[in-house]
Image (spheres, coloured by chain):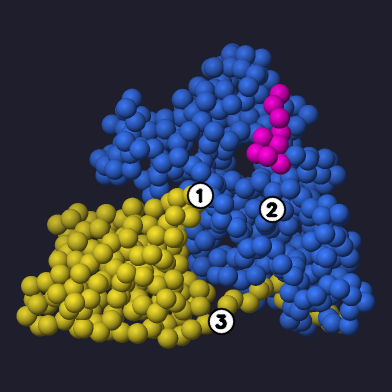
Amino acid sequence: MSSIKVLDPTANRQSDNASPGPDAGPLAGKKIGIRVDQIWRCWDWISENWEAKFRAAGAEVSYWRSTNRSGEEGEEQLRSLVEWLDTLDCAIFGLANCGSCTGWTVHDAIASANAGLPTTVVATQNFEEFAHELSERGGRSGMRVHVLPYPLNELSRAEVDPVAEEYFDGLIKVMGASIGEQKAAA
Amino acid sequence: MTIHKIRPSGRPANVPHTLVSHDCGPEACEIDWLVSDRVEVDDDISAFTSLSLEQGWGDGLPLVPPTENRVRAFLSENHRYPDKVIGRMPDSTECTVEKIVVNAVMAGARPESLELIIAALEGVTQPDFELYGVNATTASVYPAFVVNGPIRKELDIPCSYGCAGGVATQANAIGRAIRLVMRNVAGQVAGVTSQTTFGSPGRLASIVMGEFEERSPWAPLAERRGVSGNAVTAMNTMGTMNILDTTSTGAMAFIEMIGKSVAYPAANCFSPAMEYSEMYIGINPICADLIAREISNIEDVQEAIWKFAKLPGDWLQEHHRVQVEAQGRIREDGFIYATPEPKDIILFVAGGLGGLHALGLHSFGSSLAQTRALATVDAKATQAA
């Protein structure tokens, strides 16, 4: 059989930066940003728990909430994200717990990483691989991803709080951060 | 209480641009305009289809091999340069005319359909269309397209019987071409970059239908959205919802059935994941005529449907109600409305003359429909200069 040459229908993705970005380092005196959304109440609860620990360690915490991404509100979201990032020393982005919310979590985290901030994405276990895939496609394959158990949002607050406690040390490790031992126990 | 109203943004997608100078024209230049990698394969559709599956290029159905000759002929018939960038995809990949044509050839689309495919993709790549979320989501969403203008007849885009799927016209190849671009250029692959839980048959060839302008009592959809003549409106949908009505006799009865039917707790428009969404509804020509006899202004029809497309806040489960209440969406009358305003219930006329059914297309997230004009030869010449 004779052969033919066909054209590849795919387009190349942008170039990759495999670096995880800088470590967050000692947290005392720093301003830590936590990106939340309006879908996952479990992530609000975990963020509140971790906020208390960060404050006990001498850090300041600032929140940014992702809402609508279309229309004038979407345009304003992008503006406010950039302004918020500019006020931070390091940032935590969540929650990657569905398809589009993983997409937007990673989207916003890439903006943070590209701005040079120590950046960590928080994903539930089912979306861990997806978060890495989207990070790579967005040109940041080395993105730090901290993984929480799944399913999570289906649990009560009484069940979620222990998860926040259990996974805090792992978060600090993934962030490349450090806090004083006595303060960590607070 | 503050209702978040839908205000389309002025964000530019990416201004279309070309990658190299066009001064010498496509035939005179010594450069090779086609930059895609060449892959050798047996001259056989089965062999190419197998290759496409190995490479992750295909959708599982037989594909036409995109040879250089086929791609060049497609471009030539449309007076198009292949390096023109039409839009930017979610991971910043540039979507060029060349990649669109390669995928269109694979899908079996005809050259004369290229401008419709390009206009549709221009809509899909607008920031307000939220392709970033569409690609990644667990939802079953896919873009559907409503075509207006004489191009419907020229391309045999179905407006009547079976227009939302199943009619043997080239609309299927056009929709398939768009879907292949979303796969191969935008990178939407189920289980890899798309988390869609169930998917949809619409993810194979989308919905490409015409508005039945000749039987509509109202102005064409695109014209009402500011674009006259040949145009396409892209709208993300979770799938088709049938609304059967064998009992109504007057305009308000039809409207009540349609409005109430599209309102259910798990519909996109009642999700607490965002503060607002649009709703798309296709009305069959018989029903449209009956409605228009009593309500001639389509804005009044939109408002009448909107008033029925609502749910009582206290009917929702607590976690759901608390979240939409925090968004200010439970109004003073105790109801949550499907959309912020009547204008966000977007109507068009299509379907067969058997009547009885309306077509509900629930949107995805807060994505907004996009209407684009099809380029003319003059416009293309201006863009190429």
Which type of secondary structure does the marked residue at label 2 adopt? helix
> Where's residue B228, x and y in %?
75, 39
Residue A126's disc number: none
Residue A71's disc number: 1
Taking the spot 19% from the left edge, 77% from the top edge, the residue there is A29
Q: Which residue is mark 3?
A: A15
Amino acid on which disc 2 is placed: Ala
Quadrant, the N terminus of chain B? top left
Tell me, by letter, which chain the rendering colours yellow.
A
Tell me, by letter, which chain the rendering colours blue.
B
Residue B120's disc number: 2
Look at the picture and state if B47 lies above or below B15. Answer: below
Amino acid on which disc 1 is placed: Gly
| Marked residue chain, label 1 | A
Q: Quadrant of residue B288?
A: top right
Relative to B59, B158 lies left or right: right
